[in-house]
Image (tube, rainbow, N blue to C red):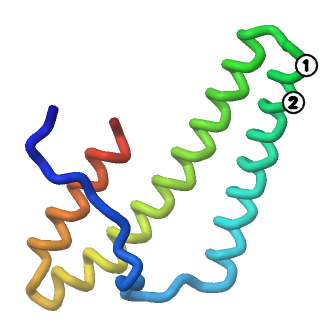
Amino acid sequence: MSNEPELSPQPDKKPTEPRTEDEKQLLQNRLKRIEGQIRGIQKMVGEDRYCVDILIQISAIQAALDKVGFSLLERHTKTCVASAIQEGNGDEHIDELMKVIKQFTK
């Protein structure tokens, strides 16, 4: 068990640099694809498919979610964290970034 507090949602915070419509669309398309994959797994379970086949699909979903997550981490670092550093209050944002990286890579 870690002594570090867990991160919690922060609905009041917004990105330093708003996402472009293209960025939002790309993320939403990826998430819709993942949603479809999850529905596919539900169908596989309902059809009593072979465990290994289901596990392979779960692995593909995890990889797809990781790709979305790393994309968001990269953008957050290049915009929000970089901006905070330039403004002289980067320590708080770096600490937050490190916490989210630790949580994300568990």
**Which quadrant would residue 81 be assigned to in this image?**
bottom left
**Total residue callouts:** 2
Describe the element under mark 1 as helix, strand or loop. loop
Specify the label residue 43 is tagged with: 2
Q: Residue at x 32, y 79 (%)?
A: 80
Residue 37 location, quadrant: top right
Residue 40 image position (x, y, % from top left): 83, 35
Pointer 1 residue: 47
Residue 14 appears left or right of 59: left
Residue 66: mark in rendering:
none
Cα distance, mark 1 to mark 2? 6 Å
Percent x, y of residue 62: 58, 36
Q: What residue sits 22% from the left and 54% below the top?
A: 99
Residue in front for this viewpoint, 21 or 34: 34
Residue at figure coordinates x 74%, y 39% from the top left = 38
- Residue 27 versus residue 106 in the image, above or below: below
Residue under the image location 72 percent in, 10 percent down:
52
Mark 2 neighbour density, 10 Å: few (under 14) some (14–19) many (20 or more): few
Residue 67's spot in the image, x, y percent?
A: 55, 49
Kind of residue at disc 2: Lys
Which quarter of the figure is the N terminus placed in? top left
Q: Amino acid at mark 1?
A: Glu
Relative to 77, does residue 45 appear above or below in the rendering? above
Left or right: where does residue 60 sit relative to residue 84? right
Image quarter in which the C terminus is found: top left
**Label 2 secondary element:** helix
Asked whether disc 1 touches disc 2, contact meaning CB atoms under 8 Å apart, the reply is yes
Which sits in the foreground, 94 or 35? 35
Front residue (pair 67, 56): 56
